[in-house]
Image: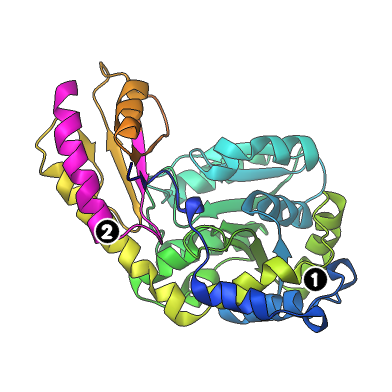
Amino acid sequence: MRIIDLRSDTFTKPNEEMWKRLRALDNSEIGDDVYGEDPTVNALEEKAAKMIGKEGALYVTSGTQGNLVSLMAHTNPDDTILVEELSHIFQNEITSATQIARLKVRTYSSNRGVPKLKDLSKSIEKNKKNPSPLKVICSENTHNYHGGAIIKPETLKDIHNLAKKYELKLHLDGARIFNAAVGLDIKVTELTKHADSIMFCLSKGLSCPVGSLVAGSKSFISKARKYRKMVGGGMRQAGIIASFGLDALETEWIQRLQEDHKNATLLANGMRNLNLPMEINKPDTNMVIVSIPKDLRIGKVIRILGNEGVLALPIDKQKIRFVTHFGIDKDDIEYALKKMEMILPQFF
């Protein structure tokens, strides 16, 4: 059976150039990264720092680990961080922040990831009465639970200026930051220059099998490296997996994300044309969020779609997420839409 896997862009697989680099790798190109002696990891970190516009970068095993060590580098135990209420850090990573970093977490509301500065300022002022000092504001770009929404540079600048006013740090969960840059057709540094630190993933749209990077000042990276070791993230001959990232950060490969965005728009428009009582977002990037009526059982919808080879992910009781990525082309989207045309009307 033909499978169209639209659950996540984490299901991507490396391209041929990545495999070629790995096959050509020899012992002279790997070393012990815990000692800073893996040439391939060092090359990747240098390349990432330069691309992102920061003094340094650090290779980590995952986005969750990257966010965790970033927050630990900016804080002390019992400090407070301020995160968006639907952010990945709050919805999926809260335990690591509270149990490992021992941080207090407060939330702010937003419109598709964009907060009202007045409300954000009130949240900061309110925390002054809290015995646990506020140290970090977190933003997410693109925003996962808001359907891949892009946070524009001017918004990030406003948030950063507010953070500086209160002597706070701004950490950017940029798991899909290159989707944001490609979606706006700007250099990624236009987005990252307004953050004190950033995490971005190699293992989503960029198609690497594993790994993320954090970037920031030299002093920040020094602290983050210490905390990476503390949480078990120190790897030895990590160049073997880091090598994939060197090709992932090539300009041509990053620009390929445009195809994913076009396919997401094609999917959203096609589903809208089914004329069914569903709310479908207009994708900024590579995510389509479909809201179904409350009287429908989302599990059944997902299951029957899956039985026909179209895989999607429920993100709450009424919302289904479809993510386009490398490995999904226009023909796959058209095939998925034909299956949906056959299946979905039975639910309404």
Judge whether residue 289 is colored magenta. no
The picture places residue 126, in percent across and down from the top left corner, at 60, 38
Amino acid type at image mark 1: Ser
- Give the residue at x 26% y 62%: 262
> Closest to the observer: 31 or 184?
31
Q: Residues within 10 Å of mark 2 (few under 14, many from 20)?
A: many
Q: Is residue 97 visible?
A: yes
- Give the residue at x 42% y 34%: 315
Residue topped by disc 2: 263
Labels 1, 2: front one: 2
> Closest to the observer: 37 or 2?
2
Quadrant the N terminus occupies: top left
Q: Earlier in the sequence, mark 1 or mark 2?
A: 1
The picture places residue 153, in percent across and down from the top left corner, at 43, 68
334 versus 28 height, above or below: above
SS for tag 2? helix
- Label 1 close to label 2 by CB (< 8 Å): no
Residue extent of the magenta highlight: 320-348
Amino acid type at image mark 2: Asn
The picture places residue 311, in percent across and down from the top left corner, at 37, 39
Horizontal side of residue 85 vs 154, given as left or right: right
Q: Residues within 10 Å of mark 1 (few under 14, many from 20)?
A: few
SS for tag 1? helix
Residue topped by disc 1: 219
C-alpha distance separating marks 1 and 2? 41 Å
- Give the residue at x 68% y 69%: 242
Q: Which secondary structure is most common in the magenta stretch? A: helix
- Give the residue at x 51% y 52%: 10
